[in-house]
Image: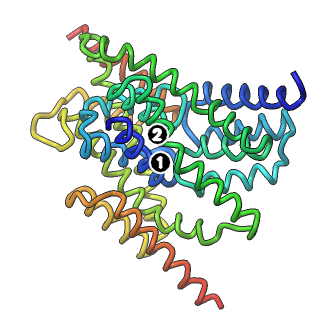
Amino acid sequence: MNDRGRRYLKLFLSTLEISAFTFGGGYVIIPLMRKTFVSRLKWLEDSEMLDLTAIAQSAPGPIAVNAAILIGYRTGGIIGSLISILGAVLPPLVIISVISAFYQAFRSNMYVSMAMTAMSAGVAAVVIDVVITMVWDILKRKRFLPIAMMAAAFVLVRFFSVSIIAVIIAAGAVGYLGWLFEKRRRK
Amino acid sequence: MIYLELLWSFMQIGLFSIGGGYAAMPLIQHQAIDVHGWLTMQSFADIMTISQMTPGPIAINCATFVGIQVAGIPGAIIATAGCILPSSLIVTILAFIYYRFKGLEAVQSILKGLRPAVVAMIASAGLSLTAMAFCGGDTFTSDINTANVIIFLIALIILRKWRPSPMIVMAGAGIIGLAAGIIL
């Protein structure tokens, strides 16, 4: 195997390993990627990793996949990004496929059902905990616009079944106008 | 065609889940339950539960789960591809802008503006999950599962106070539910 092939293989195995053993999504996975690609393999500078993180967080979609795409591209061009996407996506794809195969058969089992019912209370608590932290983050800044937007978006989505996508586009437009306004005022 | 529907649905989920992590949750709920009826509220709660305990982004886990239920392994692959297609294009464009103009100030300001709305939607999806745990549907009714309310409150207090990994909380809830079911 030549140098390039070996590099692609290493890229694939590294993203595969990170994806397979990281529980907890984007914010946990980025430090691990930094450790692998900056400290261990030395393919990237620390400052570059910070840049890539900023871009990955600015784009829509899973942050972990976005970061993998950018690192793959940076270290191996288009082929590199395809390889790192494969490495990042394969573990959840395989694991959830296996679970799905058993899900149909096991879900009706009495004991599985008992555990899953109680765990649905657990997952609700996990999500509500995250929500409390995020809402508090916005409230404690005591600025009118974000708080009003949060309240309006909640009412529209929860009680009037307004399309989520429409609300996101509208909120993005408000954010952009707010930025233009700020910029003009600063001048 | 079912494959095209899956692809298009998950492309929308990938394109509009902004801010990572739980941001995909309300969109998946909307697409898979409300629009297409691919999942029931219960199987949605189940996949969120499974997602907490397996590696990988929530959106990819859900794409695989929904895809496989609807159209087998090819469905899982197509839904996953749909999920990452928009972001791979946009991430490339953003990288270009970033290195060309040295900054993403406009993009980041839009994201900041979006944040409160995204939080509101995650809150709404979180309430649906809570209603599912308490009442077995996506709205609150008088038919309340008291055991689950107690598990929820204890889990929430533990999470707020000691900040353990969600996995531990999930496993704990499962074990308590199983033990209570066997004993009672």
* Residue ID at (53%, 64%): B111
Label 1: how many Cα within 10 Å (few below 14, some 14–19, many 20+): many
| Residue B78 or residue A41, whichever sits in front | B78
* Residue ID at (60%, 41%): A65
| Residue B140 or residue B113, whichever sits in front | B113
Give the amino acid type for the residue marked by disc 2 in the picture: Ala
The chain letter under disc 1 is B
Q: Is residue A156 above or below residue B79?
A: below
- Identify the residue under disc 2: B59
Disc nearer the start of the sequence (2/1): 1
Residue farthest to the top, as pictured: B182
Q: Is residue A182 left or right of residue A108?
A: right
User: Whole-Å distance between the Cαs marked 2 and 1?
Assistant: 8 Å
Q: Tell me residue A100's x, y (percent).
A: 39, 20
Give the amino acid type for the residue marked by disc 1 in the picture: Gly
Q: How many marks?
A: 2
* Residue ID at (36%, 71%): A148
Q: Tell me residue A92's x, y (percent).
A: 53, 27
Q: Is residue B49 visible?
A: no
Residue farthest to the right, as pictured: A3
Q: Is residue B72 above or below residue B21?
A: above
Callout 2–callout 1 Cβ contact below 8 Å: yes
